[in-house]
């Protein structure tokens, strides 16, 4: 495959993934809202982008995910109780907290997949990338929340005097576990299928 064909292929794949992310963001397919947090399935297309397109593609997909997540703070494409509260406190920091972790997640996933594809068979490499997509998304999201808004009354009320690590573990709870399991299984299946079909080098 020459460079021009490769660029067209990558552009088409990224366009399809962007469309999927937008569809998931603006329909109930992408989020399952439970309390102040939401179980998100948008980490799956981000992982697929990183697998198919590398770190840059993963970062681009993460940026789309992050942007749609931020827009929920103002009621575009759904609502986020936490996002709305953080936006009312400091809009710019709310954007950083929603956007940057998703870009960083997608970027790192490209390297994570490259690491595992040299050491594992296709399904396992894709599945592990899916796991880390959800895991790192949760870690970066909650770290940004604590760093940027930890001193605010809203977050202090959520922490309720607990140790930060205990707070994060109990706060994300079953949401994070469900995200990691679903992202691992689905990304593994889709990634392996795309690999077998020749859409992933």
Image (tube, rainbow, N blue to C red):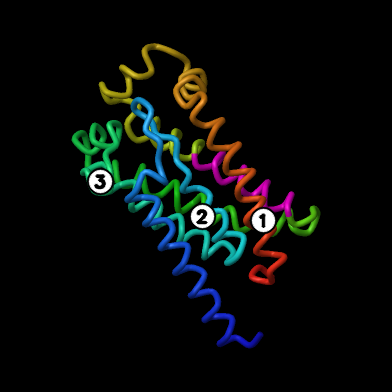
Give how far apart the Cα atoms at labels 1 and 2 are: 14 Å
What are the residue bounds of the magenta stretch?
A: 123-137
Q: Earlier in the sequence, mark 1 or mark 3?
A: 3
Q: Which residue is mark 3?
A: 92
Q: In this orientation, which residue lies closer to the viewer: 76 or 64? A: 76
Q: Between tags 2 and 3, which lies in front?
A: 2
Few, some or many residues within 10 Å of mark 1 (<14, 14–19, 20+): many
Instruction: For the C terminus, give its image quadrant.
Output: bottom right
Which disc is residue 45 wearing? 2
Where residue 117 appears, as percent x and y from the top left, is 74, 58
**Residue at the location (46% across, 66% down)?**
16
Few, some or many residues within 10 Å of mark 2 (<14, 14–19, 20+): many
State yes or no: residue 124 in magenta: yes
Q: Earlier in the sequence, mark 1 or mark 2?
A: 2
Q: Main secondary structure of the magenta part?
A: helix
Give how far apart the Cα atoms at labels 2 and 3 are: 26 Å
Q: Which residue is mark 1?
A: 113
């Amino acid at each position: 495959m020459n460079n021009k064909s490769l660029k067209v292929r990558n552009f088409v794949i990224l366009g399809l993934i962007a469309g999927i992310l937008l569809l998931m963001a603006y329909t109930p397919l992408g989020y399952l809202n439970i309390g102040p947090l939401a179980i998100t399935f948008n980490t799956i297309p981000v992982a697929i982008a990183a697998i198919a397109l590398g770190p840059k593609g993963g970062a681009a997909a993460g940026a789309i995910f992050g942007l749609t997540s931020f827009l929920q703070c103002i009621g575009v494409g759904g609502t986020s109780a936490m996002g709305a509260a953080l936006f009312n406190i400091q809009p710019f920091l709310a954007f950083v907290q929603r956007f940057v972790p998703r870009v960083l997640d997608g970027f790192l996933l490209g390297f994570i997949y490259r690491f595992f594809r040299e050491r594992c068979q296709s399904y396992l490499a894709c599945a592990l990338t899916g796991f880390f997509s959800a895991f790192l998304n949760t870690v970066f999201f909650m770290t940004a929340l604590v760093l940027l808004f930890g001193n605010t009354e809203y977050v202090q009320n959520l922490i309720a005097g607990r140790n930060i690590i205990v707070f994060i573990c109990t706060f994300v709870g079953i949401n994070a576990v469900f995200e990691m399991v679903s992202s691992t299984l689905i990304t593994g299946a889709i990634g392996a299928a795309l690999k077998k079909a020749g859409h992933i080098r």
